[in-house]
Image (cartoon, rainbow, N blue to C red):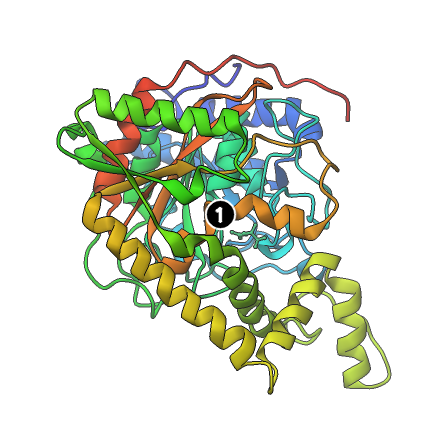
């Protein structure tokens, strides 16, 4: 790969030691973006000038002997639903086109403080609603591994950017699987941290009780490096966990001897492609060979996760998206009265899937239906938490597929309900507020990447990453690929 395919850890070490120039590293990645992003479309905007200026600043600090952070000079791609001061933030929606935030999200401040170099904002399903990045108002992203395939979603641009080596690391957000499923489809590592571990300040809200920001990387260690840089309390986010986050990176090599790993039986049966299920079993065998105690566990309520999520998430979205009214942000379609202006703006500004969710959520919350839909979904959410708690008495971490299949072709899934089924394995984690990550493990019968999901209870990041490191070490070497195809 022309940008070198280097790992973030190596780049940061070499740049901080003055052995490599941050400007040269940034330029190599920008060149690769210029060469291939016309086809892949991972980015909504590439911030080349700012990236080179920032990289020059890192080189200057290194030369002056000033301290540089753990991500010194490492290029990073940022999902376009994270506020970036002075850089348009669209959520891949027409309604936010032209909105330039006056502030940085906390995670954006933290990566900057750690020395990272932002190369651009990545494409997503509009307002993070979707599983293929085809719901972007600005056109889909292609999977760099095979460009007739989707990259997954909603953080498809971030996953594709890392897979294509446009940046060694990226930030995404995960409400029901939006980091893990695209990571699985693109053959990269993706982490959904424990709810509250990473600040949501400056993340444009989709479903506030489920949303989390997290890392993408080409290795488990790089994902740990990025997570350690962004995790920890933030007074600007009332839901952020007040205790200092435990660093993950120093614990990665502790292995899994004695660790109890539970295979979730409900997530290996119906609806999961046999080749994907086979990879999960192989990963479990690798963990057993490394000294883990592997058992089968049952988490019965996970089978209701999808139904509960598609009431809770749209309900929260309908309320969160009420602020896009033509007055405060982005698009405004003028009309004679305020009401007509708002209707015209929201009709023109929101795409079909977003409108569908707003209507679903508004209905689920309306008087007379609240108990039957939203109230019941909240009860299911409680049951999922209880079933996980029981499973975590028998196991320290759990194992499942990340997604039921490998990446599908662009345009292959037209029906929203079929699209929603992509998230059956990932949604329960968000409902429980737990942590989970996807680690590439071989390929399906079609030669495309498969992701194995490692799940952990709240604040179980350390054992989760230890298991992930063992899965990664045992994984078959990924097949090399060229980014090829026609636009
Ligand atoms: N695909 C799921 C949805 O459409 C999850 C999205 C997400 O995690 N942001 O809601």
Quarter of the image for residue 268 reads top left
Q: Is residue 190 left or right of residue 364?
A: left
Q: Residue at x 38, y 41 (%)?
A: 265
Q: Residue furthest toward the right?
A: 336
Give the labeled residue for mark 1.
177
Q: Is residue 204 left or right of residue 348?
A: left
Q: Is residue 116 visible?
A: no
Query: In the image, is residue 229 above or below residue 81?
Result: above
Front residue of 204 and 64: 204
Residue 96, percent from left and from top:
66, 61
Query: In the image, is residue 411 above or below residue 442?
Result: below
Query: In the image, is residue 286 above or below residue 41?
Result: above
Label 1 within 8 A of ligand 1 by Cβ: yes
Q: Is residue 236 visible?
A: yes
Quarter of the image for residue 284 reads top left
Describe the element under mark 1 as helix, strand or loop.
Answer: loop
Q: Is residue 329 left or right of residue 120?
A: right
Query: In the image, is residue 218 above or below residue 404?
Result: above
Front residue of 147 and 438: 438
Front residue of 483 and 407: 407
Q: Residue at x 77, y 84 (%)?
A: 339
Q: Residue furthest toward the left?
A: 258
Residue 7, percent from left and from top:
37, 23
Residue 170, percent from left and from top:
46, 38
Query: In the rendered view of the protein, which quadrant contains the C terminus?
Result: top right
Q: Residue at x 51, y 38 (%)?
A: 403
Front residue of 210 and 376: 376
Q: Residue at x 45, y 58 (%)?
A: 211
Mark 1, Cα crowd under 10 Å, few <14 / some 14-19 / many 20+, is: many
């Amino acid at each position: 790969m022309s940008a070198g395919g280097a790992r973030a850890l190596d780049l940061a070490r070499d740049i901080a030691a003055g052995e490599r120039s941050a400007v040269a590293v940034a330029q190599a990645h920008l060149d690769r973006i210029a060469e291939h992003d016309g086809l892949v479309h991972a980015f909504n905007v590439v911030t080349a000038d700012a990236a080179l200026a920032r990289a020059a600043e890192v080189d200057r600090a290194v030369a002056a002997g000033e301290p540089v952070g753990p991500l010194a000079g490492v290029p990073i791609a940022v999902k376009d639903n994270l506020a970036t001061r002075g850089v348009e933030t669209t959520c891949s929606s027409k309604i936010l086109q032209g909105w330039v935030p006056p502030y940085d999200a906390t995670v954006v401040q933290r990566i900057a403080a750690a020395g990272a170099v932002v190369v651009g904002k990545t494409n997503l399903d509009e307002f993070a609603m979707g599983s293929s990045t085809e719901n972007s108002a600005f056109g889909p992203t292609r999977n760099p591994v095979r460009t007739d395939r989707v990259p997954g979603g909603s953080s498809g641009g971030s996953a594709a950017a890392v897979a294509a080596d446009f940046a060694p690391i990226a930030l995404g957000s995960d409400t029901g699987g939006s980091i893990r499923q695209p990571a699985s489809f693109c053959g990269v590592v993706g982490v959904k941290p424990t709810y509250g571990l990473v600040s949501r300040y400056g993340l444009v809200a989709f479903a506030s009780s489920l949303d989390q920001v997290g890392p993408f990387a080409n290795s488990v260690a790089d994902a740990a490096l990025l997570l350690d840089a962004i995790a920890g309390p933030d007074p600007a986010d009332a839901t952020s966990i007040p205790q200092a986050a435990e660093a993950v990176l120093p614990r990665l090599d502790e292995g899994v001897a004695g660790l109890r790993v539970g295979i979730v039986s409900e997530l290996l049966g119906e609806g999961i492609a046999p080749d994907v299920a086979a990879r999960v079993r192989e990963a479990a065998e690798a963990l057993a060979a490394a000294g883990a105690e592997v058992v089968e566990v049952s988490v019965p309520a996970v089978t209701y996760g999808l139904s509960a999520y598609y009431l809770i998430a749209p309900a929260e979205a309908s309320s969160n998206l009420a602020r896009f009214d033509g007055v405060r942000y982005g698009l405004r379609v003028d009309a004679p009265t305020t009401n007509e202006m708002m209707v015209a703006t929201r009709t023109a500004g929101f795409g079909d899937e977003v409108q569908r969710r707003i209507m679903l959520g508004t209905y689920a919350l309306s008087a007379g239906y609240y108990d039957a839909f939203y109230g019941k979904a909240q009860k299911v959410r409680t049951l999922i938490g209880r079933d996980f708690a029981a499973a975590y008495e028998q196991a320290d971490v759990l194992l499942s597929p990340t997604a039921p299949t490998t990446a599908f072709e662009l345009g292959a899934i037209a029906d929203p309900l079929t699209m929603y089924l992509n998230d059956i394995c990932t949604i329960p984690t968000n409902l429980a507020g737990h942590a989970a990550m996807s680690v590439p493990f071989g390929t399906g019968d079609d030669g495309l990447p498969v992701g194995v999901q490692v799940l952990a209870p709240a604040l179980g990041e350390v054992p989760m990453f230890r298991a992930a490191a063992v899965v990664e070490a045992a994984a078959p070497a990924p097949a090399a690929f060229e980014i090829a195809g026609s636009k």
